[in-house]
Image (tube, rainbow, N blue to C red):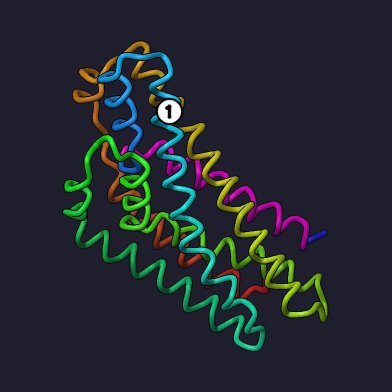
Amino acid sequence: MESLTSEAALWWAVILSGFYHGINPGMGWPLAVSAALMEQKATALPKALGAMALGHFLAMMAILLPFTAMIQLVFWEREIRIAAALLVALVGLYLLINPRHPKILARIKPTRLALWSFVAAMAHGAGLMLVPIFMGICGLDQADAGHQAAGALMRDNIETALIVAAAHTLAMVVAGGLMATVIYLWLGLKFLSKTWFNLDRAWALSLICVGIFGITATYTGH
């Protein structure tokens, strides 16, 4: 029962982090609104959000897939999980000290939303936020798998990575899409420019918290 509760909590963390990413303007939903307003077509907004979702999903997979291989080193599982959690916390600390946006984002054309979304997610450590959660889920799966062959375990971890990335991205698109739709249909960019909210510091602090959570979960056996 405790294992099921732990797994449910981890999956909720995947979904809630997706909502958090979606609400954050730094993940790009204002760009989707701008693109839709420029095209002036009813299909422009979902098209823009779809492009951003693709970029975000690919960024999540680019971060998670290498860890699916590392998890196979079961004798070093605790050390790998702690190192991953420390990395997340350190990235959060760096972003807290140095909150400036990477210059490369300004060089990407606004029309290339999928590429912009991919680079933004990588630069802000969005994929790293999922790593301690993902490794916790895989750790529970491994405990249930017993002496499953390494190849089958690797396949299961890749499937888990796909599901985690997909669930997280879907939650991100729902949250960001709601924000974008309200601005696009009713409030407009002028309202957004007057009420802009910056989550950069909250984002950095959340990465630190996720890192601490990952270390705590490792030591408590979750």
Q: Quadrant of residue 92?
A: bottom left
- Residue identifier under label 1: 47
Q: Quadrant of the C terminus?
A: bottom right
Q: Quadrant of residue 72?
A: bottom right
Closer to us: 200 or 39: 39
Give percent across and percent down for residue 33: 32, 25
What residue type is disc 1 on? Lys
Q: Magenta span covers which residues?
A: 3-25
- Residue extending farthest to the bottom is 75
Main SS of the magenta part reads: helix
Is 10 covered by the magenta stretch?
yes
Numbered-mark total:
1
Question: Is residue 140 rendered to the left or right of residue 43?
Answer: right
Give percent across and percent down for residue 61: 51, 58
For label 1, the crowd category at 10 Å Cα-Cα, with few meaning under 14, some 14 to 19 and many 20 or more, is some
Q: Quadrant of residue 77?
A: bottom right
Q: Which residue is found at the position 48% from the left and 39% from the top?
A: 172
Closer to us: 163 or 189: 163
Give percent across and percent down for residue 12: 62, 48
Q: Which residue is found at the position 46% from the left and 58% from the top?
A: 129
Question: Is residue 76 rendered to the left or right of residue 174?
Answer: right
Closer to us: 149 or 80: 149
Q: Which residue is found at the position 74% from the left and 55% from the top?
A: 5
Q: Quadrant of the N terminus?
A: bottom right
